[in-house]
Image (tube, coloured by chain):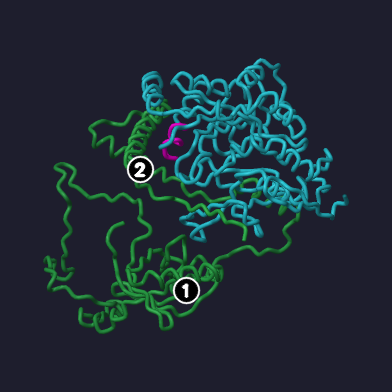
Amino acid sequence: MAHAIWSGAINFGLVTIPVKLFTAVKTDDLSFNMLHKKDEGRIKYERVCSVDGIPVPWDEIVKGYEYEKGQYVLLTDEDFAKVNPEATQSVDIVEFVELDKISPMFFDKPYYLEPTKQGRHAYALLREALADSNRVAVARVVIRTKEYIAAVKPIGDALVLELMHWASEIVASDTLDLPGAEKLPEKEMQMARMLIDTMSVDEFEPQKFSNNYHDQLLTMIEARAAGKELPKAKKAPARSKVVNLMDVLAQSLEASKKRRSDANGKPAEAKRRKKTAA
Amino acid sequence: MSSKERSTISVGAQTLSLSNLDKVLWPRDGYTKGDLIAYYRSVAPRVITHLKDRPLTLQRYPNGIDGETFFEKQMPRGMPEWVERVTVPTPGGSRSEVTFPLCNDEPSLVYFANLAAIVLHVWTSRIPVLDEPEFVLFDLDPGEKCTLRTLATVTLAIRALLAEIGLKPLVKTTGGFGLHVVVPLAAGYSYETAKVFAEIVARRAATELGELATLQRTIAKRPQTAVYIDYVQVGLGKTIVAPYSVRARDGAPVSTPLHWAEVEAFARRRSGVAPADEFAKLTIRTLPGRVVREGDLWGPKAWKKQRLEVASAKANRLWTDQG
């Protein structure tokens, strides 16, 4: 994992747990640059004033909020600093609630929390207590210069901070024209339920789903970078798939070999406990 | 003894109190919980060879095979202290660790059977090295209209592919419709290795077998006459029905290790025989005798631990150059 993007503390009651914040999800999106077709020169953006048509340097640019068409209130960096709640640098727990009492609509983006050395014990306590009571903490948190509402959840050995939307950001669905539940024939309901049953799985396995568009795009890019055009994707996939798998297998065997050679200090993965009858 | 009574028996060093032995678990066959316990005791040394030190998931049927079933993915409440157990971390789970029971001796086996744990599912690895599978697994699942002959043909084709690269697999019935083919592994291979290797063999088999086999994971899209080659059933925490485990189906069939000659005989069978009809002959009635006659076909003598380096090189040479 890369370096922490924030460090601060979880506060609840009289307890303070110093923690660091780490990214928990990364997007797979590919980013592209715009180039000039004939010479592949990077396209540059220029900030041009709409009144006099002249490029404007950064130090002459200020931010304005359009409170009415064409009417602006100007704000300087000092103005932003004045209302900046940065001083807190903390995750202040306000209350605890059962997880399923929070609509999933509210969750936005998860981050991992890692305790610093002094915080490990309290961190573990909070995590286990949350897991035992099946609750999550609702907290106010400030990251960089913005204040958020967030939930702190135990997931495996980690506490995860999940940023949430403010109530005012959630668009109510009552502006949509949605059918009610009145007089649905029991037969049809049964069929629908049966369909759901036959398509149900015991566990959700996210790795079953892959981002095909992204993968194919990446394959194409890699092939072009290697200087060859992709074969027309007709008959070949079965064979090329095996070839790729062979590479994966070779790498995997190599990794196993390395593992074996430094297996002497292998940490025990599991603790066997044989209790003797009292 | 009336069904509500408890009876006390000694198994090995332990004394167990068993309940409701007359309770019928297979209503159309009349087999009771007492019969289940008697079966597991009769094959105890064999089955324990395969259960030992592997985290165990019990599939319990407290009200028989027609009633509700539940998977117990942690040690049962009130498990006696003498039953061994293992605690494993569960990254991503709601708890940070889970304690699984182990079935390392006959008293433990009887205790589980008394819980109406008809089906015993085990991990494919053993403590203390839970991140290394002990075999590569092909789970061969025939479609609804697939014949025994087709299933056997596909199974033998996979065996032939493995033989071509120098590997010797073993085979057993799942106790349901299908067959399990495994290649016992030497120590030191990761789940990743086992899975990729299985995928390579499965893809090769599917290419060779054409319409007889499918790799389609969505049941509805599989041809009903084909065999689904499932190569993804090996992974950390994934389980397999243990050899000699009973299944909760009419007739109380048992997951039974087979001779390859038996599979060869299936492949010569006239078409029309359904796999489940044949495998239904291997039950808690017939297994104790069979095990005495045949021994454990997956036992230590047959269980040759194999390496994948040379086999992989051969597969690479043989299977990637031709179309």
Residue A270 located left or right of residue B113: left
Mark 1 vs mark 2: give the one in front: 2
**x and y percent of residue B96 in the render?**
48, 60
Q: Is residue B190 magenta?
A: yes
- First in sequence: mark 1 or mark 2? 1
Residue B267 located left or right of residue B186: right
Q: Which residues are magenta?
A: B189-199
Question: In the rendered view, would you say B281 is above or below B2?
Answer: above
Quadrant containing the C terminus of chain A in the rendered view: bottom right
What hue represents chain B? cyan
Question: In the rendered view, would you say B74 is above or below A235?
Answer: below
Quadrant containing the N terminus of chain A in the rendered view: bottom left
Can you identify the residue that label 1 sits on? A137
Q: Which of B232 and B175 lies nearest the eye of the viewer?
A: B175
Q: Which residue is depicted at the point 52% across and 54% down? A: B87
Whole-number angstrom distance, CA of label 1 to CA of label 2? 41 Å
**x and y percent of residue B209 in the render?**
53, 21
Question: In the rendered view, would you say B87 is above or below A226?
Answer: below
Q: Quadrant of residue B177?
A: top right
Q: Which of B281 and A83 lies nearest the eye of the viewer?
A: B281
Q: Residues within 10 Å of mark 1 (few under 14, many from 20)?
A: many
Residue A126 located left or right of residue A132: left
Residue farthest toward the right in the current orientation of the protein: B2
**x and y percent of residue B236 in the render?**
49, 45
Can you identify the residue that label 2 sits on? A263
**x and y percent of residue A182 in the render?**
71, 64
Marks 1/2 same chain: yes
Q: Is residue A46 magenta?
A: no
Amino acid under label 1? Ala
Task: Note the chain letter of the green one.
Answer: A
